[in-house]
Amino acid sequence: MKKNLLYVASLTLVMVLVNFSSCKKTSSNYTPSCSGATKTYSADAAPVFQSACAGCHSGKYDNYSGVSADKSDIRSKVLDGSMPQNSTLTDAQKNAIICWIDAGALNN
């Protein structure tokens, strides 16, 4: 009985680990295109944060100070495709965030 219980517990653990690893997003290593007009927070980046990030990061990424504090982490996660977790940003949305950060992440 103990062997059967140990076997079932081990099998359950393996299934849980496989399930979690299959839900992870793969990285994309996106290359931004920042030619053209300089991106601004209010017109370009903020709408993306509000539509794609505020749901999971409510209270943090719905204002300039929260976004600005994490700009390096945000940039790397947008570049590698690991954020947002439950959806995908368009190239234009990625450019809005990355190019705004690369231009100095001003509150404009």
Image (cartoon, helix red, strand yellow):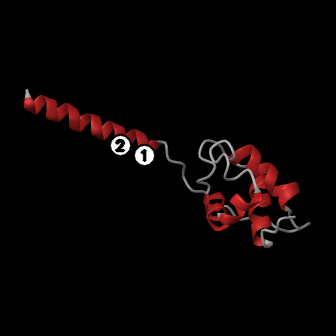
Q: Nearer the viewer, residue 48 or 81?
A: 48
Q: SS at mark 1?
A: helix
Q: Give the labeled residue for mark 2.
A: 17
As rendered, which of 66 and 53 lies closer to the eye? 66
CB within 8 Å, label 1 to label 2: yes
Dividing the picture into quadrants, the one containing residue 86 is top right
Q: Where is residue 42? Give x, y as percent.
A: 86, 56
Vertically, is 91 above or below 58? below
Q: CA distance from mark 1 to mark 2?
A: 6 Å
* SS under mark 2: helix
Residue at 73% across, 61% down = 65
Tally of marks: 2
Point out which mark residue 80 bears.
none
Q: Is residue 90 visible?
A: no
In the image: residue 100, left or right of residue 75: right
Name the residue rendered at 71%, 49% in the picture.
89
Residue found at x 70% / y 59%: 67
Q: Is residue 23 left or right of residue 11?
A: right
Which residue shows up at 29% across the image and 40% down it?
14
Amino acid type indicated by mark 1 = Ser
x, y percent for residue 55: 67, 41
Q: Is residue 1 above or below residue 51?
A: above
Identified by mark 2, the residue type is Leu
Question: Quarter holding the C terminus?
Answer: bottom right
Q: Specify few, some or many for label 1: CA neighbours under 10 Å numbering under 14, 14-19, or 20 or more.
A: few
Viewed as shown, does residue 49 lie left or right of 26? right
> What residue does disc 1 label?
21
| Quadrant where the image shows the N terminus | top left
Viewer can see residue 96: yes
